[in-house]
Image (cartoon, grey):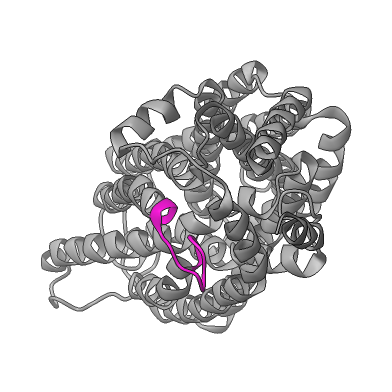
Amino acid sequence: MNDSTADGDSQRNPLTEKLDLKTKLAYGAGDLGPAITANISVFYLLIFFTNVAGIPAGLAGTILMIGKVWDGVNDPLVGFLTDKTKSRRWGRRLPWMFYGAIPFGILFFLQWIVPPFSANQSENIWPLFWYYVAIGVLSQAFYTVVNLPYTAMTPELTQDYDERTSLNSYRFTFSIGGSILSLILALIIFIKIADRQQAYLVLAAVCTVISILGLYWCVFGVRDRILAFEAKRILAEEPASLPFGEQLKIVFSNRPFLFVIGIYLFSWLAVQITASIIPYFVVNCMALKESDVPTVLIAVQATALLMLFVWGELSKKVGKKVVYFLGMSLWIIAAAGLFFLQPGQIVLMYVMAVMAGIGVSTAYLIPWSMMPDVIELDELQTGQRREGIFYGFMVLLQKFGLAFGLFLVGNALQISGFKESVAGSPLPIQPESALFAIRIAVGPIPTVCLLCGLVLTYFYPITREMHAEIMLKLKERQEKRGS
């Protein structure tokens, strides 16, 4: 029996076998749907609320905050449940993605409808507010249902230090590529359809279909690899599962994990605040048209996409920390420059968009490449693999920070005197106070976040050598169990 087991392992060993191109592409496709929907939401949902639905900026920011807070709250719960899921046909993660894909797409689409609760715009605000809160909460719940199990699969597909960086390069190629695709679609649709409300509906419908198809590509494309990993995991003798409260204590006693969630929080706080304010910056501060917004965003995302594989290869030579420092430094320079840009300086605006894109790619790549290393350290210390709960709490804290950031942006705009509009009306001229608030949100605030991320990265303790030692000790433990 031992010989047959060894033969099976030599044919397919998820711990050591390199990933083929088909599996990497399928895994990458799993981030296409979440990336497209999140990208459109981040770039356009706030401005959709204020300039199409006619909701005041403060209330619009509150809607987004409530959705993000709930999204964060349900992350650790879904992560915990996926760790406990048992399915011979699909494994632990894939059932969530398979059954959640269609509801996820439908709820995303419903966010872009403006129900006519009342003919009087002032009476329509509060019914719209509660409609978008309800849809936002449900939409974010199903976003977690499909996205968190997806992110937790990374350490299950490979345990090779450099292969994980490669795998995440494919993931974020689809992620950023999907973001670029959504912006190209937005550019085409906004040019072809003059009615802003109808344009957003068409854009949402197209993105919904693409998102669902991408998720199913991932589910069926990685299934064999995931089931091979599950077979080895089930055969391994694991200690009895700890209560949820005890798991939380262990998770937050993992020092490298605290660094990773901090790095990710500050990186993505900068990304999300910049993304949500850029449409306002382009239209109001640079005096360009709404149809110009996608081209600016494409400059950022296309650069980030091109740089992913450059950073991935460079990290093999100089390490993840150095790559992160290089990318963030360029982004900080770009963020500072955007604050001082004036109407007419279009070429400079695109130069800074490209510089920001170089940094954004490291915000995608590096924190997610660090997480599997943290999980293996926890496995060495506790004897259990808890990808779901680690990823759940990483995203939980990230989303709490983002919720607070979006709430601040929306309310800062309202306090500064920002004037909202409704579909069919011309955009109002904004006061100087609102323009200054937009500049603060596009420059100094992201800069502070990025500097905090750099400090945490400097002190992050897991190096390539430390990870190799962790994997050696895990291998020795597995060999003792098998003997």
The residue located at (57%, 58%) in the rendering is: 230
The residue located at (66%, 39%) in the rendering is: 478
User: Nearest the camera: 135 or 429?
Assistant: 135
* Magenta span contains residue 425: no
User: Left of 387 or right of it: where is 179?
Assistant: right
Residue interval drawn in magenta: 82-94
User: Residue at the front extreme?
Assistant: 1
User: Left of 131 or right of it: where is 109?
Assistant: right
Q: Is residue 167 above or below residue 318?
A: below
Main SS, magenta residues: loop
User: Residue at the right extreme?
Assistant: 317
Q: Quadrant of the N terminus?
A: bottom right
Spot occupied by residue 40 in the image (x, y as percentages of width and height): 50, 63
Instruction: For residue 12, say whether it is visible.
Output: yes
User: Nearest the camera: 326 or 289?
Assistant: 326
Q: Quadrant of residue 73?
A: top left
Spot occupied by residue 370 in the image (x, y as percentages of width and height): 64, 35
Q: Quadrant of residue 310?
A: top right
Spot occupied by residue 69 in the image (x, y as percentages of width and height): 30, 45
User: Left of 69 or right of it: where is 460?
Assistant: right
User: Nearest the camera: 328 or 418?
Assistant: 328
The residue located at (57%, 79%) in the rendering is: 213
